[in-house]
Image (cartoon, helix red, strand yellow):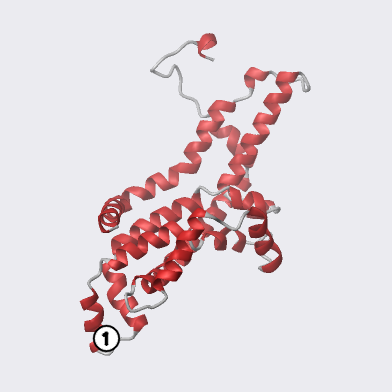
């Protein structure tokens, strides 16, 4: 491309043809994919924060006798996982989540690294506050909800951003568990468009189809899809940047 058209820092012309190509290729499916992605990201992030914070609270309590054992089991999953085939069998045959939104949400609800990071935050809370709450008659759930959660807003913002990015950028779960076009999320839809373009390009290069190879907008479409995929998160991230930076620094220092 550089040898044919040269190199210039300043664009010679501005065109939205790549975006039009993506819109024409996807149509209403693009809007549906945005809806699926937003739904799974919102639901998955909320569920992840609820379940991981509850488990992290238990693992961070020094009076929980099984904390080290369960903490080791969580850490063990970072080194060795169950494998793709057993995971597929559990999701499709045990949980029966094939072609459902649950297949895009539940596999990522608990993340070992995020769980251990949140446990580090909870360990930084002075145990005297928990003892004082116990003296006032608060139970474990009240201590978790009224003492631990308010003191760890930075942790929730940090983990929330990480989990939301994982759900938003995921294309692997739809590839495994989704056959219906109605449940294809944004990343998977863009992945299929790019795969189709590459297949046409390869066929055109080999002469299998009568298509002008130079007219296939592979690179420009790839960049347009990057903007469509990352744009919404780039708009949201600045609002959480302060909490995210504070949370990462606090977690690394406490760890």
Residue at left offset 48%, top offset 55%: 78
In the rendered image, residue 73, in percent from the top left (x then y), is placed at: 48, 65
Q: Is residue 143 left or right of residue 95?
A: left
Task: Kindly indicate the quadrant of the structure image that contains residue 251.
Answer: bottom left
Q: Which residue is mark 1?
A: 134
Other-residue count near label 1 (Cα within 10 Å), few / some / many at <14 / 14–19 / ≥20: some
* 235 in relation to 137, above or below: above
Residue at left offset 62%, top offset 47%: 28
In the rendered image, residue 133, in percent from the top left (x then y), is placed at: 25, 83
Dividing the image into 4 quarters, which one contains the N terminus? Answer: top right
Question: Mark 1: which secondary structure?
Answer: helix
* 120 in relation to 198, above or below: below
Residue sitting at the far right: 208
In the rendered image, residue 33, in percent from the top left (x then y), is placed at: 58, 50
Comparing 200 with 148, the one in front is 148
In the rendered image, residue 115, in percent from the top left (x then y), is placed at: 41, 62
Dividing the image into 4 quarters, which one contains the C terminus? Answer: bottom left
The total of numbered circles placed on residues is: 1
Comparing 75 with 30, the one in front is 75
Residue at left offset 63%, top offset 47%: 29
Asked if residue 58 can be seen in this view, the reply is: yes
Asked if residue 17 can be seen in this view, the reply is: no
Residue at left offset 70%, top offset 28%: 200
Comparing 181 with 63, the one in front is 63
């Amino acid at each position: 491309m550089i040898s044919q058209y040269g190199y210039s820092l300043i664009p010679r012309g501005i065109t939205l043809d790549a975006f039009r190509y993506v819109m024409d290729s996807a149509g209403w499916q693009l809007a549906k994919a945005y809806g699926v992605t937003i739904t799974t990201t919102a639901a998955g992030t909320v569920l992840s924060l609820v379940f991981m914070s509850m488990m992290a609270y238990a693992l961070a309590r020094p009076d929980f006798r099984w904390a080290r054992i369960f903490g080791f089991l969580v850490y063990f999953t970072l080194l060795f996982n169950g494998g793709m085939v057993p995971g597929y069998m559990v999701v499709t045959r045990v949980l029966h989540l094939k072609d459902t939104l649950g297949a895009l949400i539940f596999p990522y609800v608990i993340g070992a690294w995020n769980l251990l990071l949140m446990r580090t935050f909870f360990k930084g809370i002075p145990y005297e506050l928990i003892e004082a709450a116990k003296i006032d008659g608060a139970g474990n759930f009240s201590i978790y909800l009224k003492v631990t959660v308010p003191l760890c807003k930075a942790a929730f913002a940090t983990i929330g951003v990480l989990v939301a990015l994982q759900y938003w950028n995921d294309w692997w779960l739809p590839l495994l568990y989704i056959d219906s076009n109605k449940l294809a999320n944004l990343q998977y839809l863009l992945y299929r468009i790019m795969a189709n373009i590459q297949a046409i390009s390869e066929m055109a290069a080999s002469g299998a189809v009568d298509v002008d190879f130079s007219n296939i907008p592979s690179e420009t479409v790839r960049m347009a899809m990057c903007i469509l995929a990352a744009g919404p998160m780039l708009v949201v991230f600045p609002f959480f940047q302060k909490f995210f930076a504070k949370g990462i620094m606090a977690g690394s220092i406490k760890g």
